[in-house]
Image (spheres, rainbow, N blue to C red):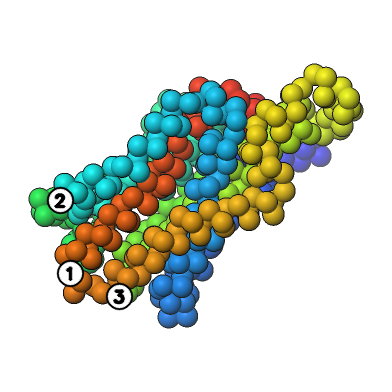
């Protein structure tokens, strides 16, 4: 009987299961939402979902609102505008980068670099979630940090480079001076991925044998994200460079929406992040939560403190409505220009091509701002308020 009681306790010590929000939320939104990418892939490859409706609806209803999610906690947050004034207003210069490069005759280079940054942004978000799980589960040994980072870097970049090497349409989007090295780079990345994966597996076995805890949420995240990228990027399909943008990114979008909504609960007066009760058991939170009179005397009104961010995050319906409105403003024109360019193909004259490049390159500014701000505003160690909002303690 005593032995039977020891084994469950030993298993509990070996397996670490600390989640960002909760087991249910994380498994549905941060890990299980990978099935949205598989669903789009199957529907598109099977011919059930046409290219233009898939990309346009995804861009306006899902992708652009996730960009708006970043704006909701930066430009629309009065406190953030005050604390990060130089970062936020300086980031607006990204709107000028594309048009300047197009005017300089570097349109192909610009769109190639934009695509690279877009894919890097996807990989960086998976890395960010992995780091959150590592922090939550005290999985911070230097050797594990290095192996996790390198495995993720190689395992995500190999299928992307291999896709470019194998797809003629994708290769035409690469500047001519770089095309010669694509196949060689793909081979190096594949070899590196295999070597690192073997080393990573050996390290997990070592952790198990030495009694170190196994970071289960991290394993589940990697098991969801890495195979999906390989399958999508290596599956033949028509108009692949366009189609995979929606198929790969919808998983990223859903992850981000849930994280933003969790973070933005700090704008509510009753949220643990606002009342200072983050990490306190729910029963104690109910007992210790201040009355309205006490809160108004000790805490600043969230509407006054955060401005429009409080309104946007007051109701889920508000967040969705504002996000879709932003999607129409941002992605509506971009999808229209992209559709015209796809319809006309190579037959359009140079003036039309230049005008479209100019318009699309300007609209890329929204995405660039999102990518850049995201690299700055989620640093848990450097910004205690983020760790508090995400309940990382």
The residue under the point 55% across, 45% down is 69
Task: List x then y, in percent, for residue 314.
Answer: 72, 44
Local packing at callout 3 (Cα closer than 10 Å; few below 14, some 14-19, many 20+) is: few
Residue picked out by circle 1:
349
State the SS at label 1.
Answer: loop
Mark positioned earlier in the residue sequence (2 or 1): 2
The residue under the point 46% across, 70% down is 54
State the SS at label 3.
Answer: helix
Number of numbered discs on residues: 3
The residue under the point 63% across, 54% down is 320
State the SS at label 2.
Answer: loop
Task: List x then y, in percent, for residue 157.
Answer: 31, 49
Q: Quadrant of the N terminus?
A: top right
- Residue 228's quadrant in the figure? bottom left
User: 287 or 84, which is in the foreground?
Assistant: 84
Residue picked out by circle 3:
343
Local packing at callout 1 (Cα closer than 10 Å; few below 14, some 14-19, many 20+) is: few
């Amino acid at each position: 009987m005593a032995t039977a009681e020891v084994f469950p306790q030993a298993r509990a010590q070996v397996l670490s299961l600390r989640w960002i929000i909760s087991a249910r939320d994380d498994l549905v939104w941060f890990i299980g939402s990978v099935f949205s990418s598989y669903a789009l892939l199957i529907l598109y490859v099977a011919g059930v979902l046409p290219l233009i409706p898939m990309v346009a609806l995804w861009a306006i209803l899902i992708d652009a609102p996730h960009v708006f999610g970043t704006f909701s906690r930066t430009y629309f947050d009065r406190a953030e505008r005050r604390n990060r004034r130089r970062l936020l207003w300086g980031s607006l210069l990204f709107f000028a980068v594309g048009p300047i490069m197009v005017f300089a005759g570097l349109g192909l280079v610009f769109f190639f670099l934009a695509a690279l940054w877009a894919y890097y942004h996807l990989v960086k978000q998976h890395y960010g979630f992995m780091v959150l799980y590592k922090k939550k589960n005290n999985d911070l040994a230097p050797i594990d940090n290095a192996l996790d980072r390198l495995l993720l870097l190689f395992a995500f970049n190999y299928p992307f480079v291999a896709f470019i090497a194998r797809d003629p349409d994708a290769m035409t989007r690469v500047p001519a001076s770089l095309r010669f090295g694509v196949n060689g780079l793909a081979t190096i990345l594949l070899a590196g991925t295999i070597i690192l994966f073997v080393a990573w597996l050996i390290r997990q076995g070592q952790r198990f044998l030495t009694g170190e805890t196994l970071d289960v949420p991290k394993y589940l995240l990697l098991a969801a994200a890495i195979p999906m990228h390989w399958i999508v990027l290596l599956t033949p399909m028509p108009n692949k460079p366009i189609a995979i943008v929606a198929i790969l990114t919808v998983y990223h979008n859903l992850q981000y929406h849930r994280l933003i909504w969790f973070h933005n609960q700090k704008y509510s007066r009753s949220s643990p992040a606002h009342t200072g009760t983050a990490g306190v058991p729910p029963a104690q939170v109910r007992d210790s939560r201040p009355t309205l009179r006490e809160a108004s005397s000790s805490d600043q009104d969230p509407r006054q403190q955060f401005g429009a961010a409080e309104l946007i995050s007051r109701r889920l319906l508000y967040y969705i409505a504002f996000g879709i409105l932003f999607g129409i403003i941002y992605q509506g024109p971009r999808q229209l220009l992209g559709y015209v360019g796809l319809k006309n193909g190579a037959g359009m004259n140079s003036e039309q091509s230049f005008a479209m490049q100019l318009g699309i390159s300007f609209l890329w500014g929204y995405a660039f701002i999102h990518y850049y701000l995201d690299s700055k505003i989620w640093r848990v160690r450097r910004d205690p308020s983020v760790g508090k909002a995400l309940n990382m303690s």
